[in-house]
Image: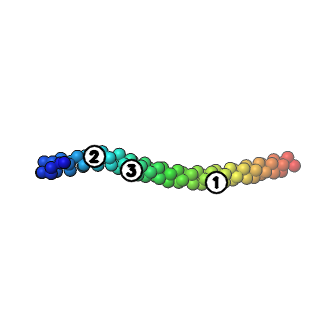
Amino acid sequence: MIRLNSKSSILIVLCTLFFSLVLFFPKIFLANNIYYVSKDINKLYAHYTSLKEENKFLAQQLEDMKFKNQIEDSLIIYSIEEAYGKNNN
């Protein structure tokens, strides 16, 4: 049987503390790592969604510019043809 005096009590407490640290440190470390990685993932996902929305907006602007350019080209060609047709008559 173990006799409990001040030295053995301190030794038992320190051994228990060391064992608990060795046992729980990996869990604490992994939980903190998972937390910070998930924060980074959420930040990157927010950037991804905002860039995706910006891409949709820019694609719509590009489509509008293409349509406008096509209409203006057809109007210019039509006006040139009219002017050329009037000059020939």
Q: Is residue 9 left or right of residue 16?
A: left
Instruction: Write the residue at 41% across / 52% down.
Output: 35
Color scheme of the displayed model: rainbow
Q: CA distance from mark 2 to mark 1?
A: 62 Å
Q: Amino acid at mark 1?
A: Gln
Q: Earlier in the sequence, mark 3 or mark 2?
A: 2
Q: Residues within 10 Å of mark 2 (few under 14, many from 20)?
A: few
Q: Residues within 10 Å of mark 1 (few under 14, many from 20)?
A: few
Say which of 21 and 10 sits in front. Answer: 10
> Looking at the image, is mark 3 or mark 2 nearer the viewer?
2
* Residue labelled with disc 2: 19
Q: Residues within 10 Å of mark 3 (few under 14, many from 20)?
A: few
Q: Position of residue 53 (x, y in %)?
A: 57, 54
Say which of 87 and 78 sits in front. Answer: 78
Say which of 49 and 57 sits in front. Answer: 49
**Element assignment for label 1:** helix
Instruction: Write the residue at 85% across / 46% down.
Output: 88
Q: Amino acid at mark 3?
A: Ala
> Looking at the image, is mark 3 or mark 1 nearer the viewer?
3
* Residue labelled with disc 3: 31
Q: Earlier in the sequence, mark 3 or mark 1?
A: 3
* Residue labelled with disc 1: 60
Question: Which residue extends farthest left?
Answer: 6
Q: Amino acid at mark 2?
A: Phe
Q: Is residue 77 left or right of residue 63?
A: right
**Element assignment for label 3:** helix
